[in-house]
Amino acid sequence: MADRKIFVILLLAALIVSGAAAATGGGTMPTEIRCDFPGEMIEAGDSAVFDLEVTNRGDTGTCLLNYWTFRGTDNWKIRFEDGDREVYRMLIPAGETKTVRLVVETSGHAAVGEYPIRVGIGTGTIWLYVKITKTHSGETGTLEATVVDKEGNVVKGAEVSIYDGDRRVEGMLTTAEGKVSIGVPMGTYTATVTKPGYRPWEKKNVDIKIGRTTDLGIVPLDKENFFAELRVKSPSRVATVGANPQYEMILKNTGKNDDTYTLSILDLPEQWYARFKESRDTPEEISEIYIPAGEEKSLYLDLIPPYSVDIGEYNFTMVIGSAAREYEEILTLRLRGSYDMRTYTKSYRHEINRGDTLTFDMTVSNVGIGGTLTNIDVNMSVPDGWRVTVDPASVASLGPGERATLKVTVVPPADIVAGEYKIIAVVKSDQAEREDEYRIVVKEQSYVALLGLLVMVGVAAGLWYMFRKYGRR
């Protein structure tokens, strides 16, 4: 029984050894490996290339191409090549020598130092060495491209995007020269180039290496048959009520074919009117326009609101229709009121007797268009000792065309000297300000003048009496 177990174990061992020999494909072929330059100095992320000469010292046969790496070679890509083909076995006739190339693509994260690689082909082995002189750990790679159309003209504003599966990693628009340079983490990606009016372009399996530049070269984009570009100089406008704002735009046919475009406005409020024109001042309006391929034309849109329009913000949708699609542009108009305030008093010169109180009415009117005056206050500037009251002291708001009457009471001091005085009324609101000047003439009271006259008459009578009584003497 023990002998039978020993036999089974030996049989299994023989099968394992024979299987291993088959896996190595003639690993016992007597060979010699030679490399004239077994050590190469490169920067991290670069590739080292070793040309190996393998000589068969035995019978004709095939053998596997093997290599072994050690510490610090994670993410390295190593392969055997014959020309532009990747290989893993080679046939060597008896007594002949064949050449195979070992390519070592290092990682940009590799640290500075020497890395050994052991190569085994048949019974022959050789040690190769890659020396990293500079690391690019922590850096990114760079993707560059130049985008042109089929005629060779550069394409400005094309979006170059880098995708990892469905996730967009990076992206950038091309410059006025059609160029782009994007920093991208190390990896293998899909690059796409898109721009409205052009058919999209895509390239898969784009390898980005740390510290290195991957150049996509010239990327040609093909134009759509029908496409247009619409550029509105100021899609958001501010105007006062009563004005007719005008939008200026450029419509360019960027497609391959000539096209006719229809012009319309959606969401126009009731009693509003819109008209498209080919020049700024012409009264003639158009509803469509013909533009040859590659050309552009200027358009003007007048918006005419009704006189009774409310102030506020209005949004409109401009629609440009073509043979293939419609183009929409949102326009915004912010209408604000014109603010103007007027004050009125029947007289700006008043006469009072000393000790009297003056009262007069002041009317404040909103003569603006569309705008409400708010927080209206009256400040009176008067001489020292004078008192002035305004009733009401303030007005919360006045809509367009509305007015308010204020009662102004002026009280001069009791000991005032007769004469002409000036008071100034400053009417202020949040939106406008108005200033008025009033003249106040203060006179002595009439009984004082009468008393003076009586005194003068009395003096005159006394003189006359004295003259009659003593004049003859």
Image (tube, rainbow, N blue to C red):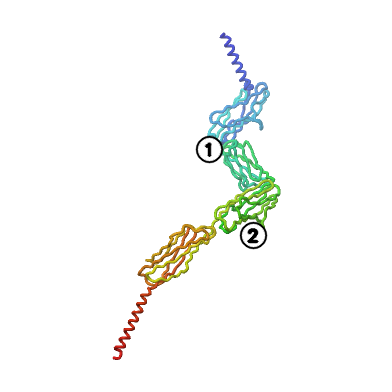
- Locate residue 296, reporting x and y percent: 67, 52
Which of the 4 quarters of the picture holds residue 394?
Answer: bottom left
* Residue indicated by mark 1: 138
- Answer with left or right where residue 423 lies relative to residue 156: left
Q: Up-down: is 155 above or below 412?
A: above
Q: Up-down: is 188 above or below 451?
A: above
Residue type, label 2: Asp
- Answer with left or right where residue 414 lies relative to residue 231: left
The residues bearing labels 2 and 1 have C-alpha atoms spaced at a distance of: 61 Å
Which is closer to the viewer, label 2 or label 1?
2
* Residue indicated by mark 2: 281
Considering the numbered disc 1 on the image, is that residue within a helix, a strand or a loop?
loop
- Locate residue 239, reporting x and y percent: 56, 56
Q: Residue at x 53, y 33 (%)?
A: 113
Mark 2 or 1 closer to N-term?
Answer: 1
Label of residue 58 in the image: none
- Locate residue 420, reporting x and y percent: 41, 71
Residue 121 visible somewhere in the drawing: yes
